Amino acid sequence: MNAVKKRLIIAITGATGAVYGVRMLQVLRAQPEWESHLVISKAGLINLQYEMEMDKAALYALADVTHGINDIAATIASGGFKTEGMIIAPCSMKTLAAVAHGFGDNLISRAADVVLKERRRLVIMPRETPLNLIHIRNMATVTEMGGIMFPPMPAFYSKSNSIAAMVDEGVGRVLDMFGVDVTGLYKPWEGL
């Protein structure tokens, strides 16, 4: 008898920080009980190449299932397709605005809308600085709808000695919200 895998949607947009989405896919790949569903924007592909020197084929190889950005008939565009939720890592301000205002113009914003309407967990890693008032209001709007804002900010108390360790801490904390085994990615704060 085959066990049903838990499904998690990973979306990557054109904001800086493609490493977060890539690292999440790598971690999920090592988890036999999880099935990753990837969707990346056109700007996300450009940024992936620029920041990580990684092409679409290498990225797609990390995911269990891939979906085209304009495939609004994809499984993840329907509430009937059961998932544990969705992570947008990194999330551009354009995508945040689309999610905040229900503008499902592509599969990322449509899948996020589905996750919110089905009352599943949506975690957004917004990447922009400094923030203007509309960015903050869009974050508040998504938060009021049940989404979680998780800006990719390093925690210095962990005394990470590399960028990779800082990325792993953020990735670990986000994936932990979904019950993914994050052993070894970061050490939770245990007090002084």
Image: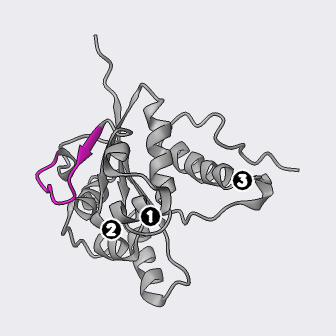
| Left or right of residue 110: residue 192 | right
The residue tagged 2 is 43
Q: Are marks 3 and 1 in contact (CB under 8 Å)?
A: no
- Residue that protrudes farthest toward the front in the picture: 53
Residue depicted at x 72% and y 43%? 187
Q: Position of residue 109 (x, y in %)?
A: 26, 64
Q: Is residue 42 above or below residue 141?
A: above
Q: Give percent across and percent down for residue 11.
A: 35, 55
- Residue 147 in sight here: no
The quarter of the displayed image where residue 116 is located: bottom left
Quarter containing the N terminus: top left
- Badge 3 density bin: few <14, some 14–19, many ≥20, Cα 10 Å: few
Q: Which mark is residue 158?
A: none
The magenta segment is 65-74
Where in the figure is residue 55, as x and y percent of width and height?
36, 52
Earlier sequence position, callout 3 versus callout 1: 1
124 displayed left or right of 79: right
Mark 3 and mark 2: span between their CA atoms? 27 Å
Number of residues whose C-alpha sits closer than 10 Å to that of mark 1, classed few (under 14), some (14–19) or many (20 or more): few
Question: Residue at 19% of width from left, 52% of height from top?
Answer: 77
Q: Which residue type carries mark 1?
A: Tyr
- Where disc 1 sits, the SS reads helix
Q: Quadrant of residue 144?
A: bottom left
* Residue to which mark 1 is pinned: 50
Mark before the other along the chain sequence, 2 or 1: 2
Q: Which residue is mark 3?
A: 162
Dot 2: element: helix
Instruction: Specify whether 95 is left or right of 149.
Output: left
